[in-house]
Image: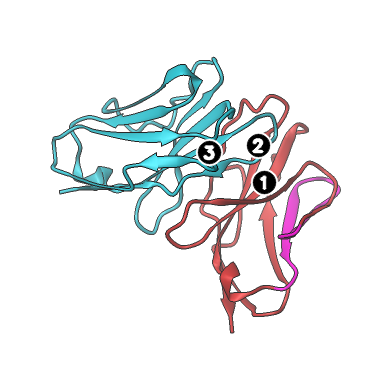
Amino acid sequence: DAKTTQPPSMDCAEGRAANLPCNHSTISGNEYVYWYRQIHSQGPQYIIHGLKNNETNEMASLIITEDRKSSTLILPHATLRDTAVYYCIVREGQTGANNLFFGTGTRLTVIP
Amino acid sequence: GAGVSQSPSNKVTEKGKDVELRCDPISGHTALYWYRQSLGQGLEFLIYFQGNSAPDKSGLPSDRFSAERTGGSVSTLTIQRTQQEDSAVYLCASSLPPNTEAFFGQGTRLTVV
């Protein structure tokens, strides 16, 4: 069962920052927040993950609230190729014993 | 190989026949996942293997579905007596726990006619 809630769809203008929210109010102390995306007809692609500190990599930034009940994935300069379904997942990270449950995600459409 | 490999990429089968789908995970990855995705739908978890632990089979939709992972590497998902509702893309992923990203294959598109 997915432990996250995301808006079903969002639009973003090309070149602007895309901010994708995720609620995970029941997250436990040892659960990480992961983000994946799925571009049409492809397998899901890992983007970023974090525990409690904000994280940044070459693809995106992840902002996690202090109470860890929500997070935001930020694509700083969205391009047309960022159009995809974005999935926010929580996963126990100590042993990797928990599998990855995907919810319905947010369909991001980047508009020219 | 460089990534997760799945075969075949496409499979068309007649209703009632059995099918086997193969997944070659990234070498050294101890965790392996199977998902399926029906047209326009999200990913549905099927089964999860982690090392030598008993697999998490909680997502298998019926007893017609089974999976095994031999030698901790290659995995085969078997669907017996296929039904039209089994038509979907079956995705495999592998990861090296703990707390690491999962890499997905390109999937097997199964069509039951």
The image shows residue B69, relative to residue B44, as above or below, that is above
**Chain of the residue displaying label 1:** A
| Residue at the disc numbered 1 | A34
The image shows residue A61, relative to residue B111, as above or below, that is below
Quadrant containing the C terminus of chain A is: bottom right
Q: Position of residue A56 (x, y in %)?
A: 80, 55
Q: Say left or right for A85 vs A67.
A: left
| Residue at the disc numbered 3 | A1
**Chain of the residue displaying label 2:** A
| Residue at the disc numbered 2 | A91
Q: Nearer the viewer, mark 3 or mark 1?
A: 1
The residue under label 1 is which amino acid type? Answer: Tyr
The verdict on a common chain for dots 2 and 1 is yes
> Which secondary structure, mark 3?
loop
| First reached walking from the N terminus: tag 3 or tag 2 | 3
Q: Which chain is cyan?
A: B
Say which residue appears at 57% left-offset and 38% top-offset.
A100
Q: Residue furthest bottom?
A: A112
Q: Are marks 3 and 1 in contact (CB under 8 Å)?
A: no
| First reached walking from the N terminus: tag 2 or tag 1 | 1
Q: Are marks 2 and 1 in contact (CB under 8 Å)?
A: yes
Quarter of the rendering containing residue A93: top right
Front in this rendered view, residue A24 or B79: B79
**Numbered range of the magenta stretch:** A58-77
Front in this rendered view, residue A40 or B3: B3
Say which residue appears at 46% left-offset and 63% top-offset.
A40
Q: Residues within 10 Å of mark 2 (few under 14, many from 20)?
A: many
Q: Which chain is red?
A: A
